[in-house]
Structure formats: C-alpha cells, structure tokens
Image: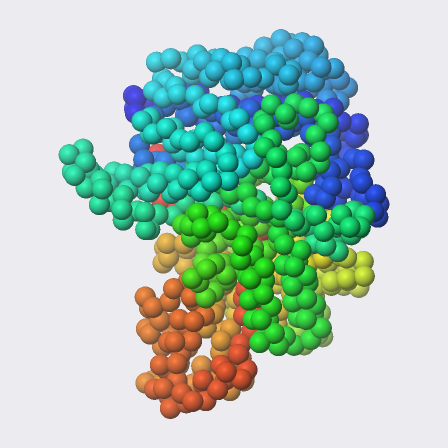
Amino acid sequence: MGSSETPEIFNRWPTYVVVFDSEAPIDRPAPAIVPVRRNEPNALGTVPHQLDKSLTSTLHPLWFFMHLPRVFRDMRDSNAKPLKEMQQFDLSHSVVLWPSRFVTERGELPSKPDHEICIIVATARTVDAVRRLVAQNALQATVYENSELSAEVLADEWNKMADRVGRANVTLARPLPLTEYVNNASSLLPLRWSQRQFLNWELPERTGPDDLGRRLRWVLEIQAHIDAIARMERDDRSRDEASSLMEKEVEASRRSVRFPVAVGLPGVPPVFAKRILPKPNHERASEPENLELLRLEQLKSDTLADVSIERAALEAVVSHRATARGGAGLYLNPAPTKAFRLLDGLESHCQSGKPDAKFVWKQLAQIGASFEKHFTEAEHDVIRHASMLTLFSNYPLGLITLPGDSAPLVCRLPIAMRPLLPLTRTLQTELSQPPLFYLADDLRVSIIECIPDSDPVGRASRAGWSIGLKMLEATPRTRAGRFDAKSAEEVSRIIAGERPHILFLSAHGHYDRSTNTAGIVVGDRTCFGDEFGAMPPCVIMSSCHTAPRGIGAAVFGDVLIRHGAVCMLNTLIPVSVSHNATLMLRFISYLSDCLEGNTTLRDIGEIWHHVAASNAVHDVLGCCTAAEEWGSSSLNGKPVIALFKLERSQGRIRLNHVYQDTIAVLDELAAESGILEKFRQWMRTLSYFPESLFYVMHGWPERIVLTDPTIARMQAAGYGKG
C-alpha cells in the first residue's frame, strides 16, 4: 500500500479535455429538447434520441480517456476493503467537452479546482491555438488530434501518468488495453477496471453474442471475490486464515454480493417517434438494432449513421457510470413499442379517474411480458445482484417484474432514472459530476405549499405537513420551515432565502396530452420548471404526474435537474393526497432516523426505496375503507398496523415479493381478528392499487448522503466535508 504519507498529487484529479467545433453562441445554454420537424430527419441532432451532431467528434476521445486513470490513486494498488467502500462513491473520469469558440474567441481552456489537465484532444482547426494556450499557461498537458489517438499513445500516456505521480509512488502501473469494439463495451470496460486488481486473471476479448454471457459471469465472479476478500479484511483475518477460508467466503458472496449497476435502455415512445420518423420507419425506434460490430476506430469517422452514433454515446455513458462506481454496465435492446403503449394506457387510465386496481395489475403484468425476451439469463443475474440501478432510459424499467419475483423491480432495489431525451443532455449530465452533499451535521429542509388553503386538497396537505414539520424540528442538527407560495416568484424567493438542502414542493400537477407537456400549477399559472431558477440539491415533488413517460412528454421533472437539482422525486400518474401524505411523512421520519443514528440507510436513494417498498402494507389496506379501518383497529391491545410493522412482519418480507408477503402476514392477523374470509374477499374482489410503485427517483440520489461511516472517518481525520 506504500507509505502512510499521501503524496499531494493523490488529492488531485486528472482531467481530460475534448475540444469540439460548435456554432452555437457560447453564452446560450443547450435546449431542453433539440427541436425537430414532423417526419423530417433533424440536421442538428441524431434520430431518435437527439444527440447534437457537433458532439459526434467527442465520442472517440471520450472512449479513449476512459482507458486512462480515473484518479491518480489508480496508479496504486488497493486492498479489497477500500475497493468495496468506494462503490458508494463516485470515482469518475473527469472529462470536459469544450466548445472550440472558447479557444478561438476567448482564448480559454477549462480550469477546475484540484484538477490537473493531462490530455487535450483538439480539432484540426484549433490544435495550434490549443498548444499555444497550453504553453502560455504552463500546463503539463499533451495535445493531440483525434486521428492521432491509438493503442501506442495510450501506453505512452500511462507512462507519462506514472512520471507525473512519481515512479516511487506507483505500485500498480498496469494499463488497460484499448477496447476493440463499441458493442457491449459498457460491460467490458468496467469489468476491466475491477479485474485490474487481479493480475493473474485474464478476460475474454471477443464480443460475439455467446461471449456476453461469459463476460457477465466474470463480472459476478470478480465482484464476489472483491466482496469476500473485503469481508475478511474487515474481520482482520490473517493471510493464512484468509487462504483457508477463501473458497467458503467466495461461495457465500456469489449468493449475496451486491454492487452498483448502470443500465442503458434506448428507445422512444411510438407517439414521439411518429413525429420525427416517416412511416413505416417510426417502429424502428423501439426495435432491436441489429447493429454490426462497430470498431472503436470507426468513431473517428464523420460519416457514421445515427444508430451507430447513438449506440456509441449511450454505451459510453453507461461505461462512465459503471466505472465510476466500481460496478457493472449493461446495454439492452430498445424498450419495446408495446411497453410504451401499455405504459401510456396505464397513465391515461389513472388520469381519467379513480384507478381500477385489477386493470393496473393487468397492465403491469403485460408490461413485464413485453420485456420477457428482452434479457438474457446472465443479464437477469447481474440485475439480481445490483445494490442500485442507474437507469439511462426513457422507460421506467422499475415497473417490470423479473422472472421468479412477484413484485416489480422498483421494490427490489433503489433505481435512479436518467432520461435519454435529448441524448445531448444525458451525456452532458453524466460528465458533470455534481458535488456530494453530506448532511449528517447540517440539514436544511423547506416545505413549500402551492395549493390554496381554500382547496380541500390544500387543507389536507397542510395537515400532513404540520406533522412532518414537528418531526423535523425535533431532529438534531436540522432547520426546517413551511411556506405558502402563490407564484413562481415567491417559490424562487423562498428557495433563495432559505437555501434548503431538501425541498418538498407541493402543488397540483398539470399534464396536457394535447401539448405533450407536464408541469405544476402555482397560483394562476402552469409552470414547467424554468420559472424557478436555481434549485436545491434534492427536490421531492408532492404532486400528480410530474414525469409521465408513455408518450414522451416534455416534463417538469427533467427541467429541475437542469437547474441544479442533484436528484428529484417525481410521479408517473395522479396520486391521492392521503396516500401521498403517508409516504411523505414516512420519508421525513426516516430522514430523522438517519440523523439520529437509528437506521443504516445511507442516502436519499436508499431512504426513498425503503419507504416506498415498505409502504406495500398501506397500499394493500387502502383497497377499501373497511380495510383501512381494520388496520387502525386494536388487536391484542395494539393497532393492527403497528403489530404488522413492529412485530409480525419482522424478517418475513422479501423485497422481490413484498406485496405477496405483506398479504400473507395480514392474512394471519385477519384470522386472529376474526375477519379472515372478509379480508380474503377484499383481496379477491377489490384487489389493491399499488400507488407507491409510480413514484420515480431521477438524477443522483446517492450524492445526497445522510450518514456514512467512511465520510465520518475522513472528517475525523481532518479531510473536511463533501
């Protein structure tokens, strides 16, 4: 592990820069959606996912950079324990996409605190100007044209990195071989980074369809070894003990290991595709791509088809995220057209009035069936071992149910969604690396109510918030306040004045299918997000259908991420005020538990997942008024719902069968209450509406941390916050 003293350079990050030609004005932000005309290919953006074609030239350098050190510490060997701990954090490649006009008109190169520019890839038109700027600023950066990048250059840059770090500080100089093919590289490249610590393990090179399954089995095997060795390191096992226990410990980890997984699921809704693709081609937007093997070297070409450009971009985004988390990447075939139509039907049904629970479950079953042949067995296995999914997609994959499960995927694990329209924004957002917010010692929460108190929903909402506010006020190291707002300007002023870390924004949702937009109502105005300006790190929407996905609407939820929100909770459908209040209060309760040390939940993603999945009992009891009243009634001197939560369900609820197991426990309580047949009749005739499934987390919820022992140790050692 080297000396106990940390060289200064290990507190800095290598940065890689791509200069690309762009005619857009420097000071104008990229649009939310690249505009396209009906049934005409877009000259500026690829079809259908809308990647600005000026960024095509950045893809080959981006892939090249991901074969170089993420951080300078990658030049040192590491034990398994810190490798496992770092899966909670973000060791991403720092890549800056730099418009050429910053070079030619302003004479500027990017500058980031604690970052060192190591390589700049410039266009033929700007390479000389970039070299002059490097010399003027005395930067230790090598400048290349894209055409010059090669395996030899990669090896040379690893050597330069060793010189920069200092040869005496390098204990792991092994470079990564340059990936040959783009196809499924999002599963290979993160695997190579994990495998780099196991010098005697050589991985398969081929990328044929039969080899992907073998590669994913390697993913599981290496992750199981990291997990097992890390566990023995935590237990301070001696080398001899670890050697004798290795086989047993690895076998245990093969069953239990969990690690972050990034998934790329392309595809756009057919309604959206019809607007940008002429018949009969609009169906191709959600069909398997049948893309021939695409060599990395081909990305240097400026004549690639849109399907190849988009594949390379999305695979790069998935690779970047999986590598940053020390996890795994999966690239799937486009979401089926049928799945989008079923989702649209489900969203429309819920928008039209009180949902029919049986219809909802039928739609969910059909959605799952539409994905039945979408995954290989190996891909299913990787997802089953995921600790969290980062989902790059326009489709809320959490609604499907994996084979062998009875509850949708969103119940199994935390999912953070990153929409793909436009793909330009997805690429920019992934490379932006938002800050980490550690809130254990200082949490500021604001609740803004935009529904008038003359509205029954507004009155019910305020009643719930008053309870939540009392919880927050009783929580140590927390400042909280509730405010009313009658205009977007008031919302902005409150946010600017209070500077909350977490904002609960309560408003009526407004989803207009005719204009394909979803926003919220504030005062007498429908707002779509741009009106509020800079947003807090975490925004929790207490509102109906702020992010429907069935027809590709321009949604409120996506806009706030562009305005600074690191993560955001949205809804696919209208939600009931009482059910929503239960979820919000339970979420606030677990925020308090985190700060008081009463739970091992770490971040906003984990907290929300626990709240939503464990809310199944409220979904089930919400099937009718009689069931709700029984849940509040007394059994053996305690409310039935309390008996369920605090005693009977303990250790009996499997997340992938959460509704089935919840009903089984309630069935026992119903028998003890003397209403068994009545309870079973409720389940048979009424069923229950699983409203908790239709909340979707967007962005980077893992970056909003409430408690983490690694960060606490770093702070105690004097490393500060964040």
Q: Looking at the image, is 262 positioned above or below residue 292?
A: below
Q: Looking at the image, is 463 positioned above or below residue 515?
A: below
Q: Looking at the image, is 649 positioned above or below residue 698?
A: below
Q: Residue at x 41, y 59 (%)?
A: 593
Residue 20 shows in this picture: yes
| Depth order, front residue of 674/318 | 318
Q: Looking at the image, is 256 positioned above or below residue 576?
A: above
Which corner quadrant of the image does residue 458 belong to?
bottom right
Q: Residue at x 19, y 37 (%)?
A: 242
* Residue 457 x %, y %: 66, 73
Q: Residue at x 58, y 26 (%)?
A: 296
Q: Residue at x 68, y 61 (%)?
A: 341
| Depth order, front residue of 237/317 | 317
Outermost residue toward the bottom in this view:
674
* Residue 629 x %, y %: 48, 85
* Residue 625 x %, y %: 54, 84
Left or right, 115 with respect to 530, comes to left
* Residue 205 x %, y %: 45, 29
Left or right, 190 with respect to 504, comes to left
